[in-house]
Amino acid sequence: MTFSAHQIAQLINGTIEGNPDNTVSGFGRIEEAQKGQLAFLANPKYEEHLYTTQASVIIVNDKLELKQPVEGALIRVADPYSAFASLLNTYQQLKTQQLNGIQEPAFVPASVKKGENVFIGAFAYIGEGSELGDNVKIFPGVFIGNNVKIGDNTLLHPGVKVYHDCIIGKNVTIHAGTVIGGDGFGFAPQVDGSFKKVPQIGNVIIEDNVEIGSNATIDRATIGSTIIKAGAKLDNLIQIAHNVEVGHNTVIAAQAGVSGSTKIGNNVMIGGQAGVVGHILISDGSKINAQSGVSKSIKIPRSAVTGSPAYDYSSALRSQALTRNLPEMEKRITELENLVKQLMEERVNMNL
């Protein structure tokens, strides 16, 4: 696919500076892009590459003042990074829209309801009674259990597994290897020291505009639903346990884990490798630093915590600063002790 600078400017509401007929058919980083590619400049520290890049079209900030001539056509926008992201999204949609029909071999029973322009890749399995909305794209090797519902414009990348009765909303992207709706970790301890499995009869609900990375696992509820609310973004290798709720527009970085029945609020940010215990509440807007261990509820909205067990971020930074100064503080305390000892000896001698 080839696009002109004029067409791109219309897509991102930008202003062209240079030749509007310059065309591109691919993307490149500004420091290495070649003719026929599109690049963008968002970080000022890369500005030097703007004057040497071979890119045919470059998206830049509308307030950027040029220090030298630029060879390619510029498209000026208020936020180059967001504009570039929007453009990539449009490009990806155009590519996926070309996928249509059912490849062979694939298992799709007659009871499956399919919307318009659905694609089902080879070796995919769709369970009885499942429903696929318009423009759903099921890539090769995907498993979808019985009675699963998938909304319009949702993409399931290769190897995704969705167990029975789960519900996935519109405009959802789930990357390769992720498992939706496996059994929650429920076992009842017995008198003899063994464990009896508690059947997990709930499901998983993923609302609209959610993206989930590769090899994540979201367990089905024991009873009721594990819920990922609209706009949430989950990275790779994340564990979400049974009956957890993840709030609107919450983001969770790679290798984080959330234990059962915990409720995470809206617009929460959880760093990589953080761990959250079960049956607690994380209030709206909270920030959990990477590798933190959250062992109790965060009840105050927009709190920031770090450490294990996690506590107030500002207090933690002060504690870390004090820890680094401990050798010097020990030296000063020893000097003060010696001074006090000397003064006490002098006082005793004066009394004599």
Image (cartoon, grey):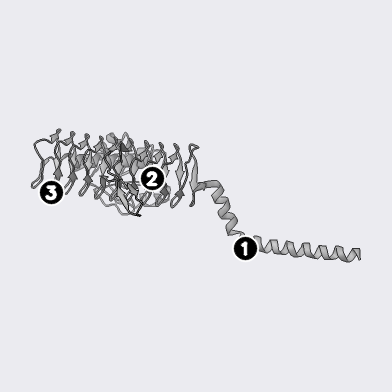
**Tag 3 and tag 2, C-beta contact below 8 Å:** no
**Precedes in sequence: disc 1 or disc 2:** 2
- Please give the residue where the numbered disc 1 appears in the rendered image: 327
- The answer to whether 50 is drawn above or below residue 265 in the figure is below
- Please give the residue where the numbered disc 2 appears in the rendered image: 42
Counting from the top left corner in percent of width and height, residue 148 is at 20, 38
Query: As rendered, which of 165 and 340 lies closer to the eye?
Result: 165
Q: Amino acid at mark 3?
A: Phe
Task: Give the SS element for disc 2.
Answer: loop
Q: Amino acid at mark 1?
A: Pro
Q: Quadrant of residue 11?
A: top left
Query: As rendered, which of 3 and 171 lies closer to the eye?
Result: 171
Identify the residue at image location x=42%, y=43%: 269
- Please give the residue where the numbered disc 3 appears in the rendered image: 123
Q: On the rendered structure, is 173 left or right of 340?
A: left
* Mark 1 and mark 2: Cα distance apart in space: 43 Å
* Mark 3 and mark 2: Cα distance apart in space: 42 Å
